[in-house]
Structure formats: structure tokens, C-alpha cells
């Protein structure tokens, strides 16, 4: 199965930056796309960004567009650069692998354990 491990979470003040990393065990037809999701306390999980692992195709949620950047390296890692962080960005962030270009969590079969991001005002 495809395994994913997130890292890079932490605490930062409003306006600061963090870079999250997702290590993907393998790229197959089941992990053509890797997405970042987040879940704040008491809220539903929402899609943040998605990238095609074999190229540069990306898509972002309106709430993070212009502040967050998803990217990949030449290995098996996907990153989420988060700039101009706001308190409302506070959440547990997950990376997930799937076979569709979408921010809908139902399309993703494999999930990481999550990493906490806390933004203070």
C-alpha cells in the first residue's frame, strides 16, 4: 500500500511561515495526485491543495490561494509552503494520495498521520 508521512508542523505567530513535507512511499496509479488537507477543532476536514506527482498541475482552495504553494521534488516528497499565516489556518494538516485531480477527500485512499500547525495572533 501507499504510505505517507507528514512533518514540519509547529507553532508560529500570525504573518509567519512554515513548510510542511510529505514523504510518499511510492508513486503508482493510486498516488497520481497528492493533496494537502486540514481539519480545525470542531470542523470538517477541507482540501487545501493538490498536485499531480508526475508534473506541475496544481489547484488550491480559495482560502489559501496566493499564500500557500504546493510543490514536489525529484524524489518522492511533496511540500506545502505556507506564508502569511493567519490564526484561521490553525489545524491538523494531512497529506493524502489518490487517483483524481480534486480537493474532495472522498477521492483519496491513503492518508498520513497528520501534523499540527498552530498560528497565534
Image (cartoon, helix red, strand yellow):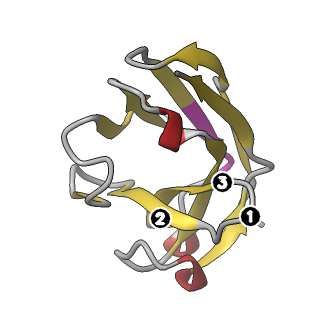
Principal SS element in the magenta part? strand
Magenta span contains residue 51 = no
Q: Secondary structure at mark 2?
A: strand
Q: Which residue is mark 2?
A: 47
Q: Which residue is mark 3?
A: 40
Q: Is residue 52 left or right of residue 41?
A: left
- Quadrant (top left/top right/bottom left/bottom right) for the N terminus: bottom right
Give the residue at x 74% y 64%: 42
Give the residue at x 48% y 59%: 35
Q: Earlier in the sequence, mark 3 or mark 2?
A: 3
The span shown in magenta is 21-25
Q: Secondary structure at mark 1?
A: loop
Q: Which residue is mark 1?
A: 42
The picture places residue 100, in percent across and down from the top left corner, at: 41, 80
The picture places residue 17, in percent across and down from the top left corner, at: 43, 17
How crowded pointer 3 is (Cα within 10 Å; few <14, some 14-19, many 20+) is rated as some
Give the residue at x 33% y 55%: 54
Question: Looking at this view, is 10 or 27 the one in front?
Answer: 10
The picture places residue 25, in percent across and down from the top left corner, at: 68, 48
Q: Is residue 73 visible?
A: no
Q: Are the two marked residues, 1 and 3, in contact with CB atoms closer than 8 angstroms?
A: yes
How crowded pointer 2 is (Cα within 10 Å; few <14, some 14-19, many 20+) is rated as many
User: From this viewpoint, which residue is outermost toward the bottom?
Assistant: 106
Numbered marks: total: 3
Q: Is residue 72 left or right of residue 5?
A: left
- In the figure, 9 relative to 4: above or below? above
Amino acid at each position: 500500500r501507499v504510505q505517507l508521512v507528514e512533518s514540519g508542523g509547529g507553532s508560529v505567530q500570525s504573518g509567519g511561515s512554515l513548510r510542511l513535507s510529505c514523504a510518499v512511499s511510492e508513486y503508482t496509479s493510486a498516488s497520481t495526485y497528492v493533496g494537502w488537507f486540514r481539519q480545525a477543532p470542531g470542523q470538517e476536514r477541507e482540501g487545501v491543495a493538490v498536485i499531480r506527482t508526475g508534473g506541475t498541475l496544481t489547484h488550491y482552495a480559495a482560502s489559501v490561494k496566493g499564500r500557500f504553494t504546493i510543490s514536489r521534488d525529484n524524489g518522492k516528497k511533496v511540500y506545502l509552503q505556507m506564508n502569511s499565516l493567519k490564526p484561521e489556518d490553525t489545524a491538523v494538516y494531512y497529506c493524502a494520495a489518490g487517483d483524481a485531480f480534486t480537493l474532495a477527500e472522498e477521492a483519496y485512499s491513503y492518508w498520513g498521520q497528520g501534523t499540527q500547525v498552530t498560528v497565534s495572533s
